[in-house]
């Protein structure tokens, strides 16, 4: 028997299944807790939109080597009514964050950090966490990066000293770490990290064969990126045609999530998946925009089946 712990009482599961909104989701072991496939996240988000009710889950990523904790209370947060939440993001919902320390190589084809997380760590070590507030840190990092860092939730938390979150107690004074940080020499959009890395691999090739293979792979990446762009251009055109010929439909957030799930499911089946074609990541928000604007999902699904047939 497995247990999912909530603040009120544990939820006992008799099998490796969890029914979410009438749909079965597979569960996997994650340490001593239970994990839910990331493919079920849209369903979880729908529950958020409907009632603000969630369980405490350990959520695995696609590669099953990373996890995150979703914490939410039953009965629309009543269990957590005395708690405050603050969330910070490295970019806004319509842009990529920027990767740093992107090194070429056969095995490492991504970036070691992004400007937001790296800047956050450096600023935290160079300032007194007893007096340096969360907002001070956020604002310091925000001025140094290319993307638009965002802050959501209870902003009163931002006025608290960083030490209360790092150490769990307030520090009037703290020892600052004095060291020379690495200088960021380049910065690229995270969604293009694999392409830039391949270009570096090509420029640093030590043999004609290595250069030839890098050229082939880079050409594939650029072609795939162009195909993805053309695919979404077509879908955007179909959405615009629908809006021109039909009256706008107002959807609740839950209905918009259902619309997104329907479209994305068809897109994964007929067109591309994130795992095989990472270039689609920056475009998926367009499906949410279509659903929010009231576009009929069946129109987009039909367009997907047409363009990706």
Image: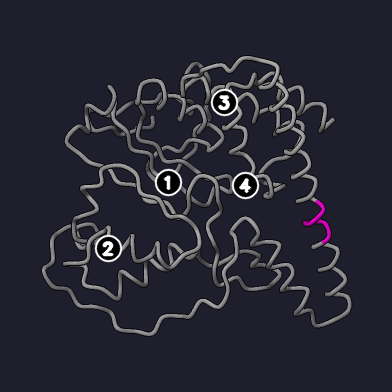
Marks 4 and 1, how far apart at CA = 21 Å
Q: Nearer the viewer, mark 4 or mark 1?
A: 4
Residue 259: image location, x then y, percent:
58, 23
* Residue 136 circle label: 2
Disc 3 target residue: 293
Q: Nearer the viewer, mark 1 or mark 3?
A: 3
* First-in-chain label (4 vs 2): 2
Q: Is residue 177 above or below residue 247?
A: below
Q: Are marks 4 and 1 in contact (CB under 8 Å)?
A: no
In what element is the residue under mark 4?
helix
In what element is the residue under mark 1?
strand
* First-in-chain label (4 vs 3): 4
Residue 21: image location, x then y, percent:
47, 18
Disc 1 target residue: 68
Q: Are marks 4 and 2 in contact (CB under 8 Å)?
A: no
Q: Nearer the viewer, residue 15 or 7?
A: 7
Q: Is residue 224 above or below residue 201?
A: above
**Picture quarter with the N terminus:** top left
Disc 4 target residue: 282
Q: Nearer the viewer, mark 4 or mark 2?
A: 2
In what element is the residue under mark 2?
helix
Q: Is residue 220 magenta?
A: yes
Find the magenta span and give its range: 219-223
* First-in-chain label (4 vs 1): 1
């Amino acid at each position: 028997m497995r247990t999912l712990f909530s603040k009120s009482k544990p939820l006992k599961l008799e099998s490796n299944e969890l029914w979410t909104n009438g749909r079965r989701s597979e569960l996997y072991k994650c340490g001593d807790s239970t994990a839910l496939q990331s493919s079920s996240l849209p369903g979880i988000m729908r529950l958020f939109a409907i009632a603000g009710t969630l369980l405490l889950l350990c959520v695995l990523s696609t590669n099953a080597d990373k996890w995150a904790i979703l914490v939410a209370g039953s009965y629309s947060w009543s269990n957590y009514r005395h708690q405050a939440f603050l969330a910070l993001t490295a970019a806004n919902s319509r842009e990529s964050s920027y990767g740093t320390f992107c090194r070429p190589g056969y095995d490492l084809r991504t970036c070691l950090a992004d400007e937001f997380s790296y800047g956050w760590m450096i600023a935290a070590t160079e300032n007194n966490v007893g007096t340096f507030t969360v907002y001070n840190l956020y604002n310091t990092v925000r001025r140094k990066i290319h993307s638009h860092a965002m802050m959501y939730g209870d902003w009163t938390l931002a006025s608290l000293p960083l030490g209360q979150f790092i150490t769990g107690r307030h520090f009037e004074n703290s020892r600052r770490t004095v060291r020379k940080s690495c200088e960021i020499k380049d910065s690229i959009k995270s969604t293009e990290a694999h392409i830039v890395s391949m270009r570096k691999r090509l420029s640093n090739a030590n043999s004609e064969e290595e250069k030839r293979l890098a050229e082939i792979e880079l050409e594939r990446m650029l072609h795939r990126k162009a195909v993805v762009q053309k695919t979404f251009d077509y879908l955007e055109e179909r959405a615009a045609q629908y809006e021109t010929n039909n009256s706008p439909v107002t959807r609740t957030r839950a209905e918009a999530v259902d619309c997104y799930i329907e479209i994305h499911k068809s897109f994964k089946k007929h067109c591309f998946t994130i795992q095989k074609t990472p270039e689609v990541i920056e475009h998926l928000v367009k499906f949410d925009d279509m659903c929010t604007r009231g576009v009929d999902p069946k129109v987009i699904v039909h367009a997907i089946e047409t363009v990706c047939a």
